[in-house]
Image (tube, grey):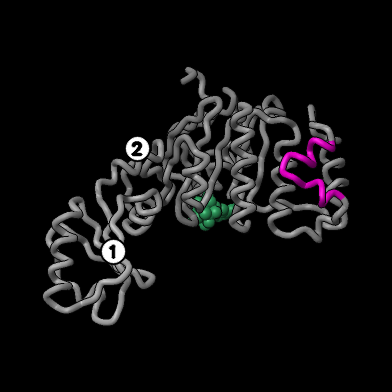
Amino acid sequence: MSAHPIIDVSDLRLDYGGTTAVDGISFQVFPGEVVALLGTNGAGKTTTLDVLEGYLKPTGGSVSVFGVNPRTERARIASDIGIMLQEAGFFGDLTVLETIRAWRRFTPNAVGTDEALSIVGLEPKAKTRVGRLSGGEKRRLDLTLAVLGRPKLLFLDEPTTGLDPESRRQTWHFLKDMVDHGMTMLLTTHYMEEAEFLADRVAIMDHGRIVRHGPVSDIVAQESSARISLSASQGVSAQTLPPIPGAEIREADGRISLVTADPQPVLLHLLRWAEDNGAALQGIEVRTASLEDVFLDVAASGKVQA
Ligand code: ATP
């Protein structure tokens, strides 16, 4: 790993009046890396991006982007940075082509119009008015404009929210291709699969703090528990199951989960109980914990362990 991070965040704090949105976080992003910020609504992800993009002044701590202060020395790094906000404002009456042309005028080093249209496959929509684009097509235009100036660093705030599963996957592949060509990315997302697909490292935020940080595989490996799950049915619910030593029993969305570090004896216990009580267990699954499980555990417990 290079000795010089592109993004360096040290003990960052950001208070909005009485609300502490970011509460002392530190992380770095190195050239060519993709880092994803995860966390529940209000965890502080967008605020962190806003500081790094130079829109907000930290209340405490420090941030640097390409080695400079992104707020006070923004002009020095602006052409190296692309930004895809959570919601972009477009002129609905302009066509996609006109929007790209307008953007090109004030984007140094912009790619050609045809190339811009092809980045995320917007050619068929070139003459469509932006106001008539679907949500997913608008997000693609957002992405096109964010990378128009061939930035070295891309900030993406929930880049695929609102997209259908196919468009989401397409966007992942577009982004992956950009990473393969050397782009560095910091993104926020609510999709665990997106983080697993794109990110070298993730940081899970909770109440303004980073509570888990590292490659997805490490974070999941640290979660030693496995999940035995089954469908709730007549006579089988979290209430009717007996206490099972070494397992925590939960029920949500019609599924019962037994969270345990040692699934074999727990499964045996469960099957014996079913046999003894004439209960038909349906939809049984046994699996190791996933990133989503870690996320849900963090969200449920509000744990704070930076
Ligand atoms: P989401 O996943 O919903 O986008 P987030 O993790 O990006 O959430 P932020 O938007 O950074 O969270 O918000 C962090 C906290 O700061 C929240 O409690 C939010 O209500 C608060 N907040 C955000 N913007 C402002 C603002 N302009 N003024 C006051 N409080 C704000």
Residue 193 is situated, as x and y percent measured from the top left of the image, at 48, 49
Which disc, if any, is residue 218? 2
Magenta stretch, residue numbers = 113-126
Left or right relative to 171: residue 272: left
Calculate the distance from the C-alpha at mark 1 to the C-alpha at mark 2. Answer: 23 Å
| Residue drawn at x 30%, y 78% as measured from the top left | 233
Q: Which mark is residue 257?
A: 1
Is 140 within the magenta?
no
Main SS type for the magenta part?
helix
- Whether residue 211 is visible, yes or no, is yes
Most foreground residue, 32 or 84: 32
Instruction: Check disc 2: other Cα within 10 Å, few if <14, some if 14-19, many if 20+.
Output: few
Indicate yes or no: mark 2 CB to ligand 1 under 8 Å: no
Q: Residue furthest top?
A: 3
Amino acid at circle 1? Ser
Q: How many marks?
A: 2
- Indicate the secondary structure of the residue bearing disc 1: strand
Please indicate whether residue 210 sits to the left or right of residue 276 in the image: right
Q: Earlier in the sequence, mark 1 or mark 2?
A: 2
Under circle 2, the secondary element is helix
Residue 288: horizontal and vertical position, in percent?
A: 30, 50
Q: Please give left or right for residue 129 compared with residue 118 in the image.
A: right
Nearest the camera: 113 or 92? 113
Q: Residues within 10 Å of mark 1 (few under 14, many from 20)?
A: many
Above or below residue 273? Residue 262 is: above
Residue positioned 57% across, 35% down in the render: 185
Residue type at mark 2: give it. Answer: Asp
The residue at the point 21 percent across, 55 percent down is 260
> Residue 149 appears at what percent x and percent y?
75, 32
